[in-house]
Image (cartoon, coloured by chain):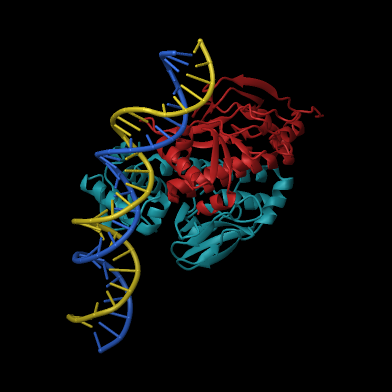
Chain colours: A red, B cyan, C blue, D yellow
Amino acid sequence: MHTQTISAPVPQIFSSARAPVVPSVDQFSAIASCSGLVATEFSYRKDEEIYGEGEPAEYVYQVIRGAVRTYKLLTDGRRQIGAFILAGDVFGLDPGSSHRLTAEAIADTTVRLVKRRSLEVAAGSNVKVAHHLWTMTAGDLRHAEDHMLLLGRKTAVERVATFLLEMDRRLAKTGMMALPMCRRDIGDYLGLTLETVSRALSQLSDQGILVFSSARQIVLRDRRKLAELVA
Amino acid sequence: MHTQTISAPVPQIFSSARAPVVPSVDQFSAIASCSGLVATEFSYRKDEEIYGEGEPAEYVYQVIRGAVRTYKLLTDGRRQIGAFILAGDVFGLDPGSSHRLTAEAIADTTVRLVKRRSLEVAAGSNVKVAHHLWTMTAGDLRHAEDHMLLLGRKTAVERVATFLLEMDRRLAKTGMMALPMCRRDIGDYLGLTLETVSRALSQLSDQGILVFSSARQIVLRDRRKLAELVA
DNA sequence: CGCCGGATTGATCAGTTTCAAGGCATGTGG
DNA sequence: CCACATGCCTTGAAACTGATCAATCCGGCG
């Protein structure tokens, strides 16, 4: 039962020379193998919707390459991005019958997916799978709790500094960060406008805390100072 | 936290005879009975800390009477309240070994508690318990996702309107809402100052959308208009 | 080369915070 | 029973942060 070497190390996403980003313990593979499910692949083009808020939650996904944003909208179009999902990350695991956020590909993206219902059935008989599901949801909750603090109480520069450290931790294996998302996405994640994000980045650049190779290629020069800025 | 109602087929064995405020479906009792645990009681005075952020998560709690706030602090004291926990709600279920937010009694409060470790052991052998734990964490996640949208993208009046509808749903059994928390707590929940909360409430009062019996006793006069305001 | 989308930068605007004063209810002691 | 202190809330005015409006600018690409 199981095997399948799912996940050869996931190839780099954004054309920069980087090491694979998949965590050493791959929960998705672990779950899939526990439950005897075979994961299939699917690809989405940049800005393509993967699922919409309120739609039945049929599948659980793992990003193989590319990146995904999940978000909620207000009636007049104001958008709050809840999370950026990078290579190796799992998403779409909304316990309950429907998705509570919309998911869209930020860049051309390939995912693996399994039927959510199968996972739940597996969880019903396999405690290990059930524990994995709980742990993953708990991880999302932890992120959301941290992000509420950011959105409710941090200043613009503190938000951007926090964002940079998060992205640095998650995708900068070589000291170089290749951001897959545009300034508007960053703003909608941080509860700011794209202009304010741009100004904060310029300010950090002026202070020598970071260096731009290009607008989305950033090298952090002083993580210590950045860490002090996040409050 | 844990304000959603799910249908649990499990009979209540340990539900408290002196807690008529508990919702008809009591997840906490359901879990306790599944796992064969006996819940003990404990009381806290107004503003007393129940557990601190970072402390080992020893117990899981249910409010019998009173109310609790959970929050995170920045280094300079700025506070973000993550949730208000009311009678019947469960809190302290942080998967992982330590609490990620501080919990404090808003008013004199009585709780039931069980050892978290016991719950996890129970979940390891009883899939029904495991599913309950997952469902409760998922409920917290849902709340956090909605709250991120509020904190990141709603205006002051929209936040207060959203807050009023949430509290109305959760504690107004008679059309009258008796808020247990002060304006500062509301502000720290909504990412606003207490003055801005006060001004928004006055504005809604001026518009006839609500009526004050006293500062914390509020009657909603026009839920429809309020619902339009939440955006 | 010139276009185009994304990013930066500048100037002004607006909403919320901050600072400050006063009101109102509750409780306490004379 | 009243005077006064206290905590919480409301309201006003000024200050400030981030938003909005408006030009460029820059890099990639047809």
Tell me if residue A195 comes above or below residue A42 in the rendering: below
Is residue A196 toward the left or the right of residue A127 in the image? left
Residue positioned 69% across, 42% down in the render: A131
Quadrant where the C terminus of chain B is found in the figure: top left
Which quadrant holds residue B8? top right
Q: Position of residue A117 (x, y in %)?
A: 64, 29
Asked if residue A58 can be seen in this view, the reply is yes
Looking at the image, residue A82 lies above or below residue D2: above
Residue B4 appearing in the image: no
**Left/right of residue B216 with respect to residue B118 in the rendered view:** left
> Where in the figure is residue A168, as x and y percent of width and height?
60, 41
* Percent of width and height locating residue B75: 50, 59
Q: Position of residue A166 (x, y in %)?
A: 58, 43
Q: Residue at x 22, y 45 (%)?
A: B208
Between residues B229 and A86, which one lies in front from this camera angle? A86
Q: Horizontal placement of A44 versus B36: left or right?
A: left
Residue B104 drawn above or below residue B124: below
Tell me what residue is drawn at x 62 percent, y 46 percent: B133
Which one is nearer the viewer's eye here, B192 or B17? B192
Q: Nearer the viewer, residue A106 or B38?
A: A106
Q: Is residue A159 left or right of residue B114?
A: left
